Amino acid sequence: MGVDNKGLRGLMKGALRLIYPPQCIGCDAPVAEEGALCPTCWAAAEFIAGLCCTRCAAPLPGGGPEEHEDIGLLVCDDCLRVSRPWNRGRAALVYRGTGRKLALMLKHGDRLDLAPPLGDWVARAAGPLVRRDMLVMPVPLHLRRLAKRKYNQAALLSQRVAQVHGLEHLPHALRRLRHTPMQDHGTFAQRFANLHDAIAVHRRVAGRIQGRAVLLVDDVMASGATLAAAATALRDAGSGPVSVVVLARAVKDT
């Protein structure tokens, strides 16, 4: 009996594993399967699985969501002070330890091989946000930064999220109107001012987003200024409700 293409790929993959055993995606330690973390990296990974702000995904003190009847009222202090132009938000990890390391490896380390496993984590976090006929799209990079980096890490994640949930992916729906400084520094207000009117919906897809629910994907959320600019552009263009999901959520040190 012959071996079909799928079976042949499985045999080849098995042979490669004998030569090159799976390694932890956060370091070079051996692991049992592809896309896994070693015990050390796992211990330093803070997955957001408990109570969190329903707007920005910041972890909140307390038990699990099942202990609270009205999850819609669980909003962090920042979201009480700042109006978010999206409805709901989720994140896979806290942006420190392994979460920070992996986000930086994907963003600046040319580690495109991390996109599938990290994208799976983002897709899992996005589960409560997914709606039928939802559009998935990444936060865009300016062409100057895209030319330098060669890829948009948010688009790699959003592609995986759309694939996992069987949703339509629009990787070029949003565009940067101007090149803006990196958001790594600056006050809360400066970050929002930096992104004001910096993102717009591409005219060729404007008709396709009318009234459609949108899931915005990015790698990291700190102040939320970039996601706010993208969500505002979508709402101004006539989209339906906007939700956001990120790989890692920066939090205040306690």
Image (tube, grey):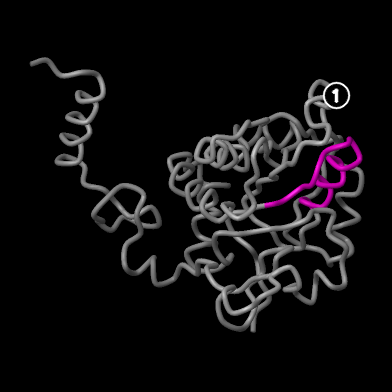
Q: Can you identify the residue that label 1 sits on?
A: 203
Residue 214 in picture, x, y percent from top left: 73, 41
Specify whether 140 is left or right of 210. Answer: left
Q: Is residue 243 visible?
A: yes
Q: In what quadrant of the picture does the N terminus appear?
A: top left
Residue beneath the point at 54% across and 63% down = 93
Residue farthest along the left direction in this orientation: 1
Q: Is residue 50 magenta?
A: no
Specify whether 134 is left or right of 114. Answer: right
What stretch of residues is rendered in magenta?
A: 226-244
**Depth check: 228 or 188 in front?**
228
Q: Is residue 108 visible?
A: no
Q: Residues within 10 Å of mark 1 (few under 14, many from 20)?
A: few
Q: Secondary structure at mark 1?
A: helix
Residue 22 in picture, x, y percent from top left: 26, 48
Residue 233 in picture, x, y percent from top left: 86, 41
Number of numbered discs on residues: 1
Q: Is residue 241 magenta?
A: yes
Inspect the image, locate mark 1, and give the three-letter code of the amino acid beneath it: Arg
